[in-house]
Image (cartoon, coloured by chain):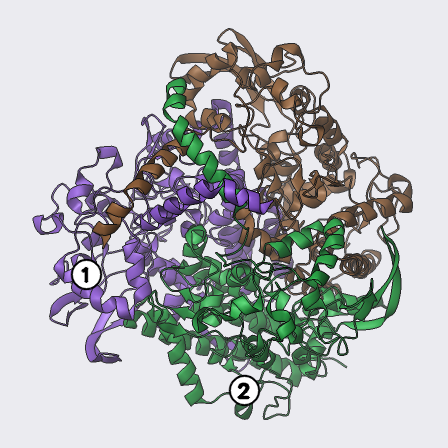
Chain colours: A green, B purple, C brown
Amino acid sequence: MEGIMMKRFAIAYLLCALFLIFIASVPTTESQLGERAAISEKTQICIDCHELYNPGLVMDWRSSRHAQTSPANAQEKPKLSRRVSSPAIPDDLQSYVVGCYECHSFNPSLHEDNFEHFGEQINVIVSPNDCKTCHTTEAEQYTESKKAHAIGNLRENPVYSSLVEAILSVKTIENGNIVPRKASQITEGESCYNCHGTKVTVAGTKVVSIDMGDIEVPDLTGWPNQGVGRINPDGSYGACTACHPRHSFSIEIARKPYTCGQCHLEPDVPAFNVYKESKHGNIFESKKESWTWDTVPWKAGFDFKAPTCAVCHNSTITSLTGEAISERNHNFGSRLWTRLFGLIYSHPQPKHGSTSVIKNKDGLPLPTTLTGEPAAEFLIGPEEQEQRRENFKKVCRSCHGLSWADGHFTQLDTTIAESDRMVLAATRLLSKAWKKGLADQSNLFDEAIEQKWIQQWVFYANSMRYASAMSGPDYASFKNGWWRATNNLQEMHDRIGSLKKKR
Amino acid sequence: MEGIMMKRFAIAYLLCALFLIFIASVPTTESQLGERAAISEKTQICIDCHELYNPGLVMDWRSSRHAQTSPANAQEKPKLSRRVSSPAIPDDLQSYVVGCYECHSFNPSLHEDNFEHFGEQINVIVSPNDCKTCHTTEAEQYTESKKAHAIGNLRENPVYSSLVEAILSVKTIENGNIVPRKASQITEGESCYNCHGTKVTVAGTKVVSIDMGDIEVPDLTGWPNQGVGRINPDGSYGACTACHPRHSFSIEIARKPYTCGQCHLEPDVPAFNVYKESKHGNIFESKKESWTWDTVPWKAGFDFKAPTCAVCHNSTITSLTGEAISERNHNFGSRLWTRLFGLIYSHPQPKHGSTSVIKNKDGLPLPTTLTGEPAAEFLIGPEEQEQRRENFKKVCRSCHGLSWADGHFTQLDTTIAESDRMVLAATRLLSKAWKKGLADQSNLFDEAIEQKWIQQWVFYANSMRYASAMSGPDYASFKNGWWRATNNLQEMHDRIGSLKKKR
Amino acid sequence: MEGIMMKRFAIAYLLCALFLIFIASVPTTESQLGERAAISEKTQICIDCHELYNPGLVMDWRSSRHAQTSPANAQEKPKLSRRVSSPAIPDDLQSYVVGCYECHSFNPSLHEDNFEHFGEQINVIVSPNDCKTCHTTEAEQYTESKKAHAIGNLRENPVYSSLVEAILSVKTIENGNIVPRKASQITEGESCYNCHGTKVTVAGTKVVSIDMGDIEVPDLTGWPNQGVGRINPDGSYGACTACHPRHSFSIEIARKPYTCGQCHLEPDVPAFNVYKESKHGNIFESKKESWTWDTVPWKAGFDFKAPTCAVCHNSTITSLTGEAISERNHNFGSRLWTRLFGLIYSHPQPKHGSTSVIKNKDGLPLPTTLTGEPAAEFLIGPEEQEQRRENFKKVCRSCHGLSWADGHFTQLDTTIAESDRMVLAATRLLSKAWKKGLADQSNLFDEAIEQKWIQQWVFYANSMRYASAMSGPDYASFKNGWWRATNNLQEMHDRIGSLKKKR
């Protein structure tokens, strides 16, 4: 039978061979591009060497949009499809593809990590301030976001930074007692500040041996890191590579939930886990290969059939016919009315990305008091909340009827309120322990009962809220939700009964 | 070099351009269909408006089989490939595609959610009883299942519903004691009843403002929800959309494990997690893109190379040559002989989907006594168990030799027995605490030691059993299995030593 | 419009129909192969029957490279692309595809599981020693690995085997005390030894009924199992199917992280979970469908753009132009300098795959003392460590600059040291409890406080280290990292305060 088939399909084989050859000759890029722009002479010099030593790095770049198109071409796109937002890209960048030299040579005087490298002045790190040259709006929006201030929001806030210290200190046992010793900066950069970002500093230069001989390079501390709030050697905040990784600058990767899931995962911020459990996550995992991931604008129901994080939180979304549903914004909190992430209660979104300036009624740098009263002057008001919420609902309405969307938000409101009451119960138990001298309030985070209190808000109440917001019900019930919150209260209660008064 | 290639492949480009255009012109549907049937006039009116307001919703439907084929065409398929099972689809439905109006207008007199909408009588919710018009066998089988009775199986069972209440109540602290307050119905619908289903009721009507002006719509409570046991406004039980989501009614999504994983995940029912850890899950994740997901029947080794949940539990499976291996059944427990999900011990499958009628020897509504004796008259007998088990094994035999399959089931039997003994040990410890007055038996679920007992069966013994059934060994060892079960017993034992007698 | 399109694309339809037919006629194999070799007569007899009874099994084999190519063809490949490594494949195997009979008939005199089956002598199990006939180097390397010795490394080590027993024993309650009873061998094979491997023994023969009548087959115990250290009925160690599953022998599946993730997952060895959280895992999940999975050698930046487990730990990796980056090795520890998996502390890699021979200064069979001093004579020295580390870095350098790679390894060193200090703190607390008679040192693993100590190293310190090695920061912070390690110390400390002296 096979023999017969072979003869009958000879012509098919021929056609397909041609087809396969064609496929192989197509530039491996994220979308169909126009004529390919030229590589600048300086970038070509970089490539000549680095393609030998870092072939994967150069190959990654070759697959990128940056390697295919020039700013001049990029600006010709209709406004809604345009990925560059600067009205004034310098002339000398216009006609070359966006290559090694173009990005790694910006603003040398600002860059403490600038060094002389085979005759050129090169920056090790490309910062959001450099990307801003072409992507102005995005960089500016980002600068406003809580993400850009992610380091200060921890480090400059005495309450949160004492929580970090309680967790990250290396413990030794002295006379049977636990004595915390400051952890190295590296340990911080490997845990909390891996996502929040490190401060990258230049300690001087060092000589390293490569195949071509010894070269002198900047000696960086806090590096490598690609946290969202990284403080760069040029003084700018953030790392575009946190979401558009490394030399492909992929919009596809940024739009897939795995990116957000790198930092927003259980037990503290279970957004990714809840999404995966949700119907939206199910549809995404089941059908993602048939969706289109790199078109701008991104068309609801056509390019994708269920939202990913980016759809609701920051991408430009339109209908198939191009009617705007929501506009791109790289200030990721800007569409949100409530902050689900309870610190220690849920609260209206802060007005500014830098949150360490917040002071509650009791003088603590927290968005609510310990009993849940919001520090209103630092948070957006009801009107702004209402408007953001209505805008947000528009995205839901692309695929859901009005009853569905309205019902969903009503459910969320209720869960937010009830989860906050479960935190309040834990706070009341802890307050009792503090008042009776069974625990010591001077550090809020270093005793076992205090750590149960922390779990009540960071793990359990947050899980309930994310579970509601994105419909992942196990995170509201047995997995870090009502079950754990209930059991945790019981454990706190029983522990208080067994504690002895502290001296 | 590229220049040369360009010339040589000019013809390839031409062929491929044609190919790409062709691809774009193919209806985006799950499988090759015959001639496309017409859209009814009434459905077209729905589309004209909703395509503007809910573009994603309409686009989702357009991608569905429903949007491409008519019942008349569907019935022409050979029996084994047929997806409709009604012998008597009404004439007026026969020749149109299955559109908005067709589904949202059934049985208006039964539907409390029926309302007048721009001149037509429309139901908000399409229920299993509506789908039954064409999918009779599937709807009838489903009605028999535990899934269809998922609400009553919790709510009408005094033991389980007191567990739900212990978990879901909002706790306040009064005089240092934890006082549970009934949680809102919404909280229930966001957690346990999100999967089990809500009762959707019509509280009246309400006026909502849309772009076209004010309209009056039913005011639903318990909505949105797509739990498997949802009680619909027409009195029917269930939601087909729980597995065939929303307007694509996809068989592909239902066959992928992400769907089942929305509700069957750790820590309580770790089926999805164990599957992912298993060799079957590994092969699925590694090769799924090369499998065929929407053919009926589904051919073992040809369409798929490792089972998903649907293969073993409900799909029509045949060999490549069409020999039946197992027959489709939407009563999802019907192939199973044992119920691994221990409540509180594993037990033979219940005879009926409604389990709240079960009474054990001690008069409790549980399938076993607290020491593990089955309530035999409510459960299937050994003969039925044996027959189901042998049928089940046939699916394994598609890819595994006899020694392998037999050995697997022997291993499972042993693990079931030993996991039940680990529950018994916990029950004995708790009984001791109850007898000595160290804990209060009046509510089985509200004290810390009782909550450890719950974890022993809901989390740990269940994990061991699922781990054995699907070969995900970490769920039998360090992840919620023997390790936790062992440690939990130790903690229960130590706690008893530290408890004081209750008044 | 559709009508017009139909006409214009008539020719496209024609071309595509041919294309589709062509696709269907292509052998479903992992890569483009040369001329298909013949199936041997004996294998054809196997197929004739088993295709009826195990269609999925045969279909799986048909999709394999083994079913398409003969050893003679395989040996013609250039050295770097060759998948067979034996210089002396027997003549009678050379010209047929690698089929049922070829593999299941090797070395019958060694195979206790050999039996007469319809006139032929067949082995149930194909062992690494059988695969070695063609894949000599791979089998030999594997034999050196810790994986091959995975059973003895647990069972022959009195300390680790007492941990296994503490966990896996079935507990009963007698006089209110927990009494462990030895678990069945099956329970061991379903949990720890599912990954480590079982000893498969032949208990005799048994008669089984199949459709063709009664047949006599070997009666195996410890079967089914595909653990990495399985002891086979021919005396060899291991199971190639653990990673190259079952009759497809897929290199693609082995290269995907799901395979490693079957055994290396949280909470004890969270390698897979950390990978998924990492940037590498993100890029893998986002782009894997566009990568090439079955080429040998595997080209960095071209076939794949981010590493999977196999890239760093065992595959042959080259640049696009074929320059070697790292060489295939099936001794999976051979590239590693440090063993992150702390037992109980991290330590240099053992010199030999069989680790039960190790003795520390205190005479315990552990790679370090209880306070962390390495059993240096059994572990590789600093020079060997340095060399492996430098080789490992080469893989990183494919895509990362030198500063990045150097910085990464510096960070890892620090985390390893600090995580070990967190284990030491727990050990100090436990020692105090032992010394004061508050816990009983005769069994290290059976009391609640000892189990907290175990978690400190198996769960928390390991998580920190894997989190650092592969950059999954939540596993260093809230998810089983510093948070849990800190909280666990606090709980150990408080528990000591509440313990009474043992008689």
- In which quadrant will I find the N terminus of chain C? bottom left
Looking at the image, the residue that sits furthest to the left is B91
Quarter-of-image position of residue A493:
bottom right
Q: Is residue A291 visible?
A: yes
* Residue A116 coordinates in the image, percent (x, y): 83, 67
Disc 2 on helix, strand or loop? loop
* Kind of residue indicated by mark 1: His
* Kind of residue indicated by mark 2: Lys
Foreground pick, B458 / A436: B458
From the viewer's perspective, is C486 left or right of B206?
right
* Residue C126 coordinates in the image, percent (x, y): 60, 22
Quarter-of-image position of residue C358:
top right
Q: Residue A351 shows which numbered tag?
A: 2
Q: Is residue C422 above or below residue B342?
A: below
Q: CA distance from mark 2 to mark 1?
A: 44 Å
Q: Is residue A201 above or below residue C6?
A: below
Sort mark 2 into few (<14), some (14-19) or many (20+) by Cα contacts within 10 Å: some
Quarter-of-image position of residue B235:
bottom left
From the viewer's perspective, is C428 left or right of A337?
right
* Residue C200 coordinates in the image, percent (x, y): 62, 25
Label 1 lies in what chain? B
Residue at numbered disc 1: B104
Label 2 lies in what chain? A
